[in-house]
Image (cartoon, rainbow, N blue to C red):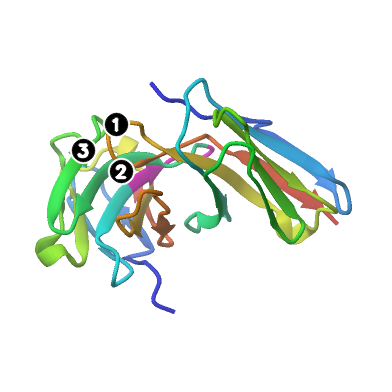
Amino acid sequence: DTGVSQDPRHKITKRGQNVTFRCDPISEHNRLYWYRQTLGQGPEFLTYFQNEAQLEKSRLLSDRFSAERPKGSFSTLEIQRTEQGDSAMYLCASSLVFEVTEAFFGQGTRLTVV
Amino acid sequence: TQLLEQSPQFLSIQEGENLTVYCNSSSVFSSLQWYRQEPGEGPVLLVTVVTGGEVKKLKRLTFQFGDARKDSSLHITAAQPGDTGLYLCAGPKLSGSARQLTFGSGTQLTVLP
């Protein structure tokens, strides 16, 4: 199965620490998305890449958040100086460039800031 | 602002019952997707509807896209405990090309044995 892979699945960190998450998309997909999901809510868009270019960022993505996709392959999402409000499920998805956007999600990284 | 409103927010039914959940917006969407998400996992794509009035069936699940492409429904026949999960609808943000998906807040379905 060559679906979207995220690492780690779970991360517990102390407030103020930096954390980095990795996403490996489906190999032929050139679009990659990051979403954040809190309990009882649908996923909220954070940012999106087409190949290596970061084309769109949500206002939710404060300056403590940074995402990269070097060489248009895997992507990383870093959160600096974590806050308790950052606790959430971070989801990565990928898709092909088609008129209809169908995103395929990874299993997510559950972040808990204590 | 394009909002997708899902109803009901929670639904608990007995095995064998039928149910319908709804996804509504005041905006027109070029397509809508339905996903199912289980606890601790990412959403899994179930179906995409594109044409107004379109009906798609996936075993016991029937998806319909409204004629005006502003709403969609998911009907489950003879629900089973394995149908339990968070059902999410999503549509592309209308800003030029289809880029990011906007999600509703979901319907949490529990099917009791």
Q: Could you tell me if residue A66 is visible in this image?
A: no
Neighbor class of circle 2 (other Cα within 10 Å; few <14, some 14-19, many 20+) is many
Secondary structure category for the residue under label 2:
loop
Q: Is residue B40 left or right of residue A111?
A: right
Q: Is residue A61 left or right of residue B90?
A: left
B38 vs A74, nearest the viewer: A74
The reply to whether the C-beta atoms of the residues labelled 1 and 2 are less than 8 Å apart is yes
Residue B12 on image: x %, y %:
78, 41
Q: Which residue is mark 3?
A: A57
Neighbor class of circle 1 (other Cα within 10 Å; few <14, some 14-19, many 20+) is few
Q: Nearer the viewer, mark 3 or mark 1?
A: 1
Q: CA distance from mark 2 to mark 3?
A: 11 Å
The reply to whether the C-beta atoms of the residues labelled 3 and 1 are less than 8 Å apart is no
B96 vs B13, nearest the viewer: B96
Q: Which residue is mark 1?
A: B95
Residue A40 on image: x %, y %:
54, 38
Quarter of the view holding residue A9: bottom left
Disc 3 marks which amino acid?
Lys
Q: CA distance from mark 3 to mark 1?
A: 13 Å
For the record, the magenta segment spans A35-40
